[in-house]
Amino acid sequence: MTPPSRFLDRVEAGRLLAEKLDRYAHEPNVLVLGLPRGGVPVAAQVANRLGLPLDVFVVRKLGLPGHEELAMGAIATGGIRVINQEVVKPLRIPEHVIEAVAASEQRELLRRERAYRDDLPLPEVKDKTVIVVDDGVATGSTMLAAIGALRKLEAGRIVVATPTISPSTFWEIERVADEIVAVIVPESFRGVGQWYESFSQTTDEEVRQILAQADARFPRTNA
């Protein structure tokens, strides 16, 4: 199938992405995780079309103050913290700086956790094949943080899936994920939004509605 030049919206992007993941359809022990917010509607299409359970995985990058695009590490669902020693050690970033940024991002992570799951249990990923979905990957810092967190949570196999990704980031993620799947890997990549006709911001309420619909098929419970 010839990839499109652009996606109409996240629904179409998710549908086309699901076609590239059809070997996982209805497989037991496979879970689809959407990175909020924009990754969730894409992940919902993947989960629906493959007959797989859907959940959300909240990751917050720990950006260096004054240079927030530079990731010192990340925190994620499940109380996971990942520190990027390749950034922290050469720059001799003090522990108190990391702690201050982590505390700030922890507040936002907890807010999103409450918004998306109320009192529902956290996703169980240990020994599972996890398909991690975002609506696009530019620098890759959030996705790399998610991979690191899922490794700490002992996911069995990590499959990164995204409609579009920059070529350099594709190769970087390929080195740390078990598999990476993308629909469009353009030679020129200025940003995720350029590959969508409609790229409006996904709201917390939209994420809640998507997860509620998914729960009707695969409830997020401890059972």
Image (cartoon, rainbow, N blue to C red):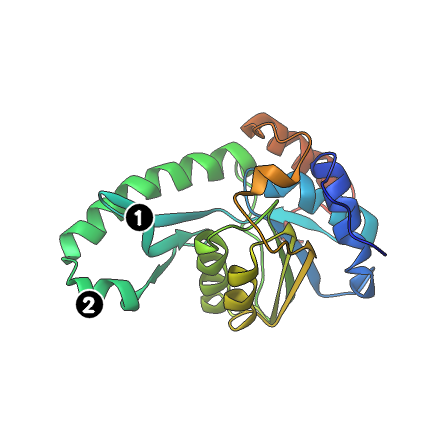
Q: Position of residue 53 (x, y in %)?
A: 72, 51
The answer, for residue 93, to whether it is visible in the render is yes
Q: Amino acid at mark 1?
A: Gly
Q: Count every numbered label the image shows and give the total.
A: 2
Viewer-nearest of discs 2 and 1: 2
Q: Nearer the viewer, residue 167 or 111?
A: 167
**Marking on residue 90:** 2
Q: Position of residue 77 (x, y in %)?
A: 46, 51
Residue 222, compared with residue 115, is above or below; it is: below
Q: Residue furthest right?
A: 1
Secondary structure beneath label 1 = strand
Q: Residue tagged by mark 1?
A: 63
Secondary structure beneath label 2 = helix
Disc 2: CA contacts within 10 A as few (<14), some (14-19) or many (>=20): few
Q: Nearer the viewer, residue 120 or 34?
A: 34
Q: Is residue 40 left or right of residue 176?
A: right
Image quarter of the N terminus = bottom right
